[in-house]
């Protein structure tokens, strides 16, 4: 839209009104600016990041140490695999990826490690590289050995009750000890506590990284970006809004 001149750049308004752009989350602003080839064409009212949710009840029952902030993915794999080894955890997966498909799970995992599905110009796939193989191999091993959940949501048509969706989620039904999911997933957990009900004690830690540095988190999402139509007769009013 910016390349076709359909939306207005905002930098002039930001400078004119001394808008405190530094108060916004810098990675989100940077991502939007990069999408506009260096100019800022929109602002996001919110964003979502990812975390590792864990079921305290299942961990304590299996006598397995709880997850902690700043874990590497290798540490997460080792923790999840213990549920396959534990006599009290044989029927429980160590890790799930919410309602994501295996392909989507791999994509999320790779992005959290700073990997891209294609080259920077978008012309060549990068899946057959050492970095992606390092991400894929433990994921595939976990699926084969059963300590990563392979449960998939059912294909449905028409309206779906949230209660039915929650019943298909391995974490919310006590069949998975950990779930890698977005920050919005916390709302699902709290809602499931009332609807299913999901009664286990739970917690959350920072999203795992390739380095173990929680400040190195690469995965976040922006659902909405507000911009100003180039043909708008009320551009200043839109900016004020």
Image: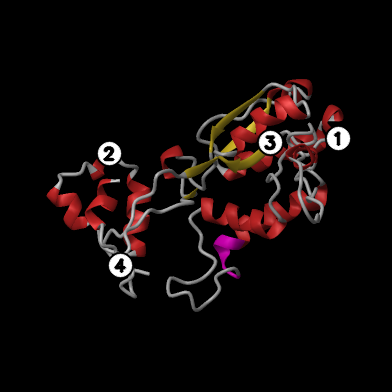
Camera-nearest label, 4 or 3: 4
Mark 1 vs 4, N-terminal side: 4
Camera-nearest label, 2 or 3: 2
List the residue tagged with mark 2: 23
Mark 2 and mark 1: span between their CA atoms? 48 Å
75 above or below 153? above
229 above or below 187? below
Mark 3 vs 1, N-terminal side: 1
List the residue tagged with mark 4: 37
Residue at 86%, 35% in the rendered image: 90
- Magenta stretch, main secondary structure class: helix
Q: Is residue 176 one of those drawn in magenta? A: no
Mark 4 vs 3, N-terminal side: 4
Mark 1 and mark 4: span between their CA atoms? 51 Å
Q: Which residues are magenta?
A: 128-132
Marks 4,3: beta carbons within 8 A: no
Residue at 46%, 38% in the rendered image: 214
Mark 4 and mark 3: span between their CA atoms? 38 Å
> How far across and down, in percent of the image, does residue 43 sit?
34, 51
List the residue tagged with mark 1: 90
Circle 3 SS class: strand
List the residue tagged with mark 3: 178
Camera-nearest label, 2 or 1: 2
Camera-nearest label, 3 or 1: 3
Structural crowding at the residue carrying mark 2, measured as other residues with C-alpha within 10 Å and reported as few (<14), some (14–19) or many (≥20): few
Q: Quadrant of residue 50?
A: top right
> How far across and down, in percent of the image, does residue 173 sit?
79, 33
> How far across and down, in percent of the image, does residue 91 sit?
86, 36
């Amino acid at each position: 839209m910016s390349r076709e001149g359909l939306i207005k750049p905002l930098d002039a308004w930001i400078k004119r009104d001394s808008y405190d752009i530094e108060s916004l989350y810098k990675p989100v602003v940077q991502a939007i600016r990069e999408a506009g080839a260096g100019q800022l064409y929109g602002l996001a009212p919110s964003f979502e990041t990812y975390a590792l949710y864990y079921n305290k009840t299942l961990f304590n029952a299996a006598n397995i140490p709880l997850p902690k902030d700043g874990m590497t993915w290798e540490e997460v794999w080792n923790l999840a695999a213990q549920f396959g080894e534990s006599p009290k955890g044989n029927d429980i997966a160590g890790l799930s990826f919410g309602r994501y498909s295996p392909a989507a799970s791999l994509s999320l995992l790779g992005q959290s490690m700073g990997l891209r599905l294609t080259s920077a110009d978008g012309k060549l796939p990068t899946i057959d590289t050492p970095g992606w193989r390092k991400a894929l191999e433990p994921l595939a091993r976990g699926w084969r050995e059963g300590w990563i959940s392979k449960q998939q949501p059912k294909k449905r048509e028409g309206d779906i009750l949230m209660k039915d969706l929650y019943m298909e989620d391995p974490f919310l039904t006590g069949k998975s000890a950990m779930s890698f999911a977005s920050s919005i997933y916390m709302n699902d957990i709290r809602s499931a506590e009332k609807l299913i009900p999901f009664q286990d004690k739970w917690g959350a830690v920072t999203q795992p990284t390739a380095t173990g540095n929680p400040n190195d988190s690469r995965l976040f999402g922006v659902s909405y970006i507000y911009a100003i139509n180039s043909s708008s007769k009320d551009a200043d009013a839109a900016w004020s809004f």
